[in-house]
Amino acid sequence: MRTSGPLDAETILSATEDVLRRHGPAKATVVDVGKALGVSHAAVYKHFPSKTALREAVSRRWLNRDRDGLAAIVGDTGIPAPQRLRSWLAALLTSKRAKAHDDPELFAAYKILVTEDSSAARDHVADLLGQLAAILADGMADGSFRSADPAESARAVFTATTRFHHPGLAGGWKDPGIEQELDVICTLLLDGLRAAPPRPASTGRGGSHGHP
Amino acid sequence: MRTSGPLDAETILSATEDVLRRHGPAKATVVDVGKALGVSHAAVYKHFPSKTALREAVSRRWLNRDRDGLAAIVGDTGIPAPQRLRSWLAALLTSKRAKAHDDPELFAAYKILVTEDSSAARDHVADLLGQLAAILADGMADGSFRSADPAESARAVFTATTRFHHPGLAGGWKDPGIEQELDVICTLLLDGLRAAPPRPASTGRGGSHGHP
DNA sequence: CAGGTTTCAGAATGTGTATTCTGTAACCCG
DNA sequence: CGGGTTACAGAATACACATTCTGAAACCTG
């Protein structure tokens, strides 16, 4: 099946992506990948140390396509930060949902990474948090948002929108009202980010939890 | 094993709960429940139409214990709504985490209900949303929160805190910083709920999603 | 000697059959 | 006749055994 030349990592990754798409992460084997390349499975192991590493590399590439799409929104400093945040979160949902729907097998592979807490998944989250933080920092700089640690705020926003991007909750993305649901939460979060700290009287802030 | 008298639903539920705890939802059988009661498995079917119904009933009871504990916080109108909201969410995390940790098998049974979208799970969520809405309504009445539809706001707050109560994400509850993480999000949400609608100029509200 | 091959051990997975479980029915009994 | 029993069919599960897969090694070759 291989047309010419020596095997390189990119070629293997593409073949693996195809195999994964065809058979799914549960049934895809390294032998299949070799077969797709017209090569023995051991040849694949010359380029990747393990099946796991191979799967990770494929997912990484696949996830980076999302990331790069979202980066365009982050970089579009023409529109104000609050709107950009909204767009970014909506686009995150859209692209995740598209992946889950159009590429269920690769999505399943990604889910495995997340449950195994692999570095690929962690890095992806870190990338997204970085993008969020960039938007928030812009907004804080121009006064749209009140000043705070952009990284901490980014994590809060990301966590508060878990239901719209966590792969384990993908089942709920086909819900009809989901876009509006995200909209409501965006509004709530934007109000929270924008709010001036309330009159510093005792309005119940502070570390005390627990039932009194 | 049954000490006396005729079998009633409550007795069966308790026995089932024990069996579930011992064997887990995957291995527990109706025959086991019968054995625990000193009765044939068919006797159980005189009181419950199916194994699924039995599992649901057990989970319902188990979940209602959570709900009743949280209701105490809702009813404690002595403390201001914002603080009550904080306490309620913290207590929700605490009790869910306790259940996941102390009763892993029953928790697994509950997880099954959620993934199957059973009525027991839906009802439980509805109960919690009701409690949240009550707190929010109180806060709106006394001016702590700006006026809005309490039910819609409740859903937003509930969704925004998904990571702290959704059983599918229980793995993250042992995270050391989780209490603080919840705290940060509480603060953000409370600010959002409290915020006066910002100057009605064009600060980017409205239904437009998608990458521009 | 980079980049491929065949071969192999032990782990993982599949397969096909025996057993167990669910849910129903027909049957007792106090 | 409510509340229990045993008996049973078909679905689900467990188990033992055969196959396949992973990853490593030793071995070719331009």
Image (cartoon, coloured by chain):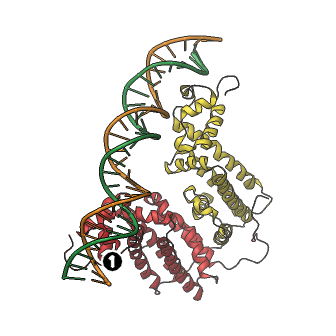
Chain colours: A yellow, B red, C green, D orange
For the N terminus of chain B, the quadrant is bottom left
Q: Residue at x 70, y 23 (%)?
A: A4
Q: In this orientation, does residue A208 appear? A: no
Vertical position of residue B61 compared to residue A136: above or below: below
Q: Position of residue A171 (x, y in %)?
A: 58, 60
| Image spot of residue D23 (x, y percent) | 47, 30
For disc 1, the chain is B
Q: Is residue A169 visible?
A: yes
**Quadrant of residue A194 within the rendered picture:** bottom right
Say above or below: A71 vs B203.
above
Direction from residue C23 to residue A104 in the image, left or right: right
Using the rendered view, name the quadrant where residue B39 is placed: bottom left
The image quadrant that residue C4 belongs to is top right
Quadrant of image for the C terminus of chain B: bottom right
The secondary structure type at the circle numbered 1 is helix
Q: Between B163 and C4, which is closer to the camera in this rendering?
A: C4
Mark 1 highlights which residue? B9
Residue at position x 79%, y 72% in the image? B202
Q: Position of residue A175 (x, y in %)?
A: 63, 66
Q: Nearer the viewer, residue A37 or A89?
A: A37
Q: For the residue carrying disc 1, how many other residues have a C-alpha within 10 Å: few (<14), some (14-19), or many (20+)?
A: some
Q: Is residue A174 above or below residue A131?
A: below
Residue B43 in the image: state x and y as whole percent: 30, 72
In this view of the protein, which residue sits in the foreground, A103 or A65?
A103
Tell me which amino acid carries mark 1: Ala
Seen from the viewer's position, the closer of residues A99 and B174 is A99
Q: Is residue B1 left or right of residue D2?
A: left
Looking at the picture, does residue B42 appear above or below residue B194?
above
Count of numbered marks: 1
